[in-house]
Image (cartoon, rainbow, N blue to C red):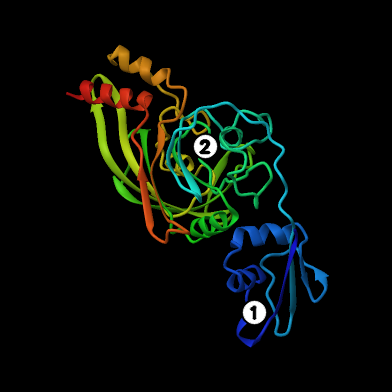
Amino acid sequence: MEKKISLIVNETSQNIRVDSFINKHNELISRTRIKNLILKKNLRINNRIITDPSKKLSINDKIEILIPEPKKASLKPYKYKLNIIYEDNDLLVINKPAGIVIHPGAGNYDNTLVNALINYDQKLLSNIGDELRPGIVHRIDKNTSGLVVVAKNNFTHENLSSQFSEHSIIRSYQLLIWGKLRPSKGKIITFIKRSSKNRQMMEVSQSKGKKAITNYETLEIFENKKTPTLTLVECKLETGRTHQIRVHMNYMGNSIVGDDKYKKKFKKIKNIDETLNNLLTNLNRQFLHAKTLGFFHPIKKKEMIFTSKLPHELEILLKKLRNTNN
């Protein structure tokens, strides 16, 4: 059933953005969702359709925003064993392996995590987002492994979405990169926008796009006569832009091992350990793992933090590097 929210702008709210104004008066609707509703022509100001979420308001403006009835997903179930590490009545935390896409999209509508969730229990997912993304609050890339939280109901979805928008979610990743980071620890602050050369890729910009902040720290360096120089890094995200860590590492000149998009050509060194060489060249994913995920539970009203171990194929590579380093 569709719902209409009507508001009048008073003196204290003039000159603020309309999406902020609506969010301030109805915190159950995330700012991201409000923006999407506005872009889809669901907002009227003084009875005129407005499609600009950043429109500034004037005193006595009459605001009406229509919240349509959620669409029902018409997706096929996918028989796939989910690694569920936590579940309650409101949400799931899943440890996603590399190789599976989070939600349906061009070229793959059936073999995704969403399809697997529908197979697990079709009734458990929130339905306020895109009909192809029921329950999905955030994403990690197909060839990245690690933790993802999924919402079972709309209240939880909105609340978690707001936490992501406010950058209060704890997210840390482990990754293996080519070379050494200089400085070895720091914060990367740039804008990230879609690449002008390849629409499937993103790139750093100094003025356009969305602000992206990555905190990084060197954990371990592998460097001797039998190995190329490689570094194990931990990144903590303050923002969650598309391909953020991959783009930021590439920007630093240290692309992630196994990254097929933002890659550095691997030049085989003469005396490289043969087993290590095979592990590096045959890795069919990027060495990037969403290790820690923390959030404030919308219903239980407490902070919850989850961690996951590196998957086997990454642990083997690390173990070999450590043994070769001795």
x then y, percent, for residue 221: 26, 34
Q: Residue furthest top?
A: 274
- When asked about the image quadrant of residue 257, the answer is top left
* Structural crowding at the residue carrying mark 1, measured as other residues with C-alpha within 10 Å and reported as few (<14), some (14–19) or many (≥20): some
Q: How many marks?
A: 2
Q: Residue furthest left?
A: 326
Relative to 204, residue 37 above or below: below
Q: Looking at the picture, which amino acid does disc 1 mark?
A: Asn
Q: Residue at x 57, y 68 (%)?
A: 27
According to the image, label 1 marks what residue? 15
Q: Look at the image and tell me in which quarter the N terminus lies.
A: bottom right
* Structural crowding at the residue carrying mark 2, measured as other residues with C-alpha within 10 Å and reported as few (<14), some (14–19) or many (≥20): some
Relative to 150, residue 302 above or below: below
User: Which element carries disc 2, helix, strand or loop?
Assistant: loop
Q: Residue at x 60, y 62 (%)?
A: 31
In the rendered structure, which disc, 2 or 1, sits on the residue that comes first in sequence?
A: 1
- When asked about the image quadrant of residue 155, the answer is bottom right
Relative to 29, residue 92 above or below: above
Q: Nearer the viewer, residue 214 or 135?
A: 135
Q: Looking at the picture, which amino acid does disc 2 mark?
A: Asp
Tell me the tag on residue 141.
2
